[in-house]
Amino acid sequence: MYIAKEERYEKMIYNRCGKSGLKLPAFSLGMWHNFGSVNNLENMKKILFTAFDNGITHFDLANNYGPVYGSAESSMGRILKSDLMPYRDEMIISTKAGYDMWKGPYGDGGSRKYLTASLDQSLQRLGLDYVDIFYHHRPDPETPVEETMYALDQIVRSGKALYVGISNYKKEQAKEAYRILKELRTPFIIHQPSYSILNRWIEEDGLKDFLYENGLGCIAFSPLQQGILTGKYLNGIPADSRIGGKKSPYLHEDALKPELLEKVKELNQIAENRGQSLTQMALSWILKDGKVTSVLIGASRPEQILENIRALDNLVFSEEELRRIDEIARG
Ligand code: NDP
């Protein structure tokens, strides 16, 4: 039986999620990879316990994380039941619906039918009465945004989620969602976009500033570009990596273009000069201006979590470092 470390809250930083009452850890753990039915349960436990022992209180899921779809939630459900349930009130568990989940017209998109049924299924797999945050996973151009937002509102009022969020919405889409949810007085507190040194769309689109200026939280996913920004692919493809033996359908060898690897090499040099690993620099860079609430990392081993959270030891960048990083990222 797992017993959480006494000192688990000593080092982590907790940031307020926008203007809400909820605080999130500077690092949250995502369960997109490594928690499916194809993965090893003991390793999952080690990853989750290492995270929790080090102050990571937020665990991010979605209905279709696996493989197979649904199995990451089932894994979390098993581990909650065997070990983590005594800590439920110290945890923020989120899930989402919006991508394809089950066959037919009601298992994808943004309809009230899909979102409501999907959350019921998620709660069953997780063995929970409610999740802390429920997201619409991506905008659905075929469903009126009012319908999707009313569904999120109803979900909170039914007690099945405490807060709601949206993910992958561009600024203009987020603005519309915000307008509706504000009118409904729904506790909409967070947006989940991709963001990294090499992926700046939320800066270019204006989404990052929009969220900050309107008191909404922002949790950045794939901050390491799925591992590329650790530098692990600089000298070939490691056998136990996402591109290597794990053969992820979401990241292929052809992503490793020579120009990209050159950028990673140059960034690595800056990190070395700062006395950080490239991984740590990439993570602290996201937190540098206080506009991102939490960085949503993935990990295939507990050691990766330990390395990554040490990014908190150095969150300060000089003007010159920031200028060089921007220059390298732009190419
Ligand atoms: P990252 O960019 O942090 O990539 C994580 C992967 O990088 C790990 O699984 C591991 O892969 C590698 N890695 C991490 N740390 C280290 C280290 N210290 N040394 C070496 N390798 C390391 O994030 P993800 O792409 O996994 O995304 C994080 C989370 O964001 C997801 O789990 C999910 O919750 C969320 N997400 C949300 C999406 C959305 O649409 N809302 C879409 C995508 C993700 P390996 O060891 O296998 O090479």
Image (tube, rainbow, N blue to C red):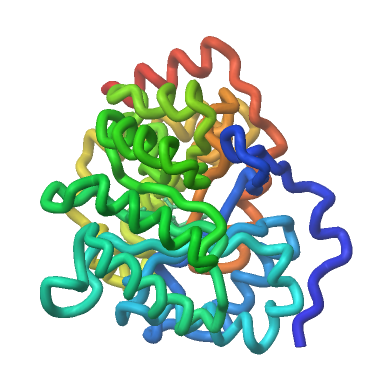
**x%, y% of residue 46?**
63, 75
Q: What residue is shown at x 40% (from left), y 68% (from top)?
A: 33
Residue 26 can be seen in this image: yes
Say which residue appears at 55% left-offset and 11% top-offset.
319
Front in this rendered view, residue 244 or 44: 44
Whether residue 299 can be seen here: no
Question: Residue 185 location in percent, x, y?
Answer: 49, 42
Residue at horizontal 37%, vertical 85%? Answer: 38
**Left or right, residue 102 beside residue 186:** left
Q: Is residue 128 above or below residue 8?
A: below
User: Would you place residue 272 above or below residue 39 in this image?
Assistant: above
Q: Nearer the viewer, residue 249 or 14?
A: 14
Residue most toward the top? 319
Residue 265 located left or right of residue 286: left
Residue 200 lies, in percent from the top left, at 33, 30
Q: Nearer the viewer, residue 275 or 29?
A: 29
Query: Dividing the picture into quarters, in which one does residue 16 lie?
Result: top right
**Quadrant position of the N terminus in the picture:** bottom right
